[in-house]
Amino acid sequence: FKGPWDDAQMCAVLRKSCDEVDADFLARPGGAADGCSAVIALLTGKRLFIASVGDAVAFLGEQSSSGDIHVTRRVARHVLTSPTELGRIRAAGGEVTCLSAKGQHVLQRRADGPGDS
């Protein structure tokens, strides 16, 4: 593709890149039982795109006109006990199971879940 990319195209490329890394990771022996986290920040001109995988956190510091620095969280918090997060995981073909009364959880992805080909 030549020419400027709009926001939707940039988001689609970042999502596809993350999906490809995920597929490669899952294809490894034992890959479905392992996990990792990452944050990708892409600054192009005055546009900033942030993508995250797993429970990695991204913060953005911005300087105000008065010189103060304001820090904001830029990615959603992925908490396995959140109903929204549980729904997202299940829709992607995963499952969260409780391992102990101490609240330890494990995320499992079924090899035949949505998005697998």
Image (spheres, rainbow, N blue to C red):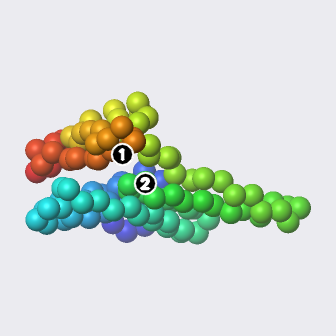
SS at circle 1: loop
Q: Residue at x 45, y 63 (%)?
A: 39
Residue 79 disc label: none
Amino acid at circle 1:
Gln
Q: Is residue 58 above or below residue 109?
A: below
**CB under 8 Å between discs 1 and 2:** no
Quick one: 77 or 68, which is closer to the camera?
A: 77
Label 1 to label 2: alpha-carbon separation: 15 Å
Question: Hey, which residue is sitting farthest right in the picture?
Answer: 66
- The answer to whether residue 15 is left or right of residue 42 is left
Q: Is residue 55 above or below residue 67?
A: above
Q: Which residue is mark 1?
A: 104
- The answer to whether residue 105 is left or right of residue 27 is right
The picture places residue 82, in percent across and down from the top left corner, at 43, 35
Q: Residue at x 44, y 46 (%)?
A: 78
Quick one: 83 or 44, which is closer to the camera?
A: 83
- The answer to whether residue 33 is left or right of residue 77 is left
Q: Which residue is mark 2?
A: 55
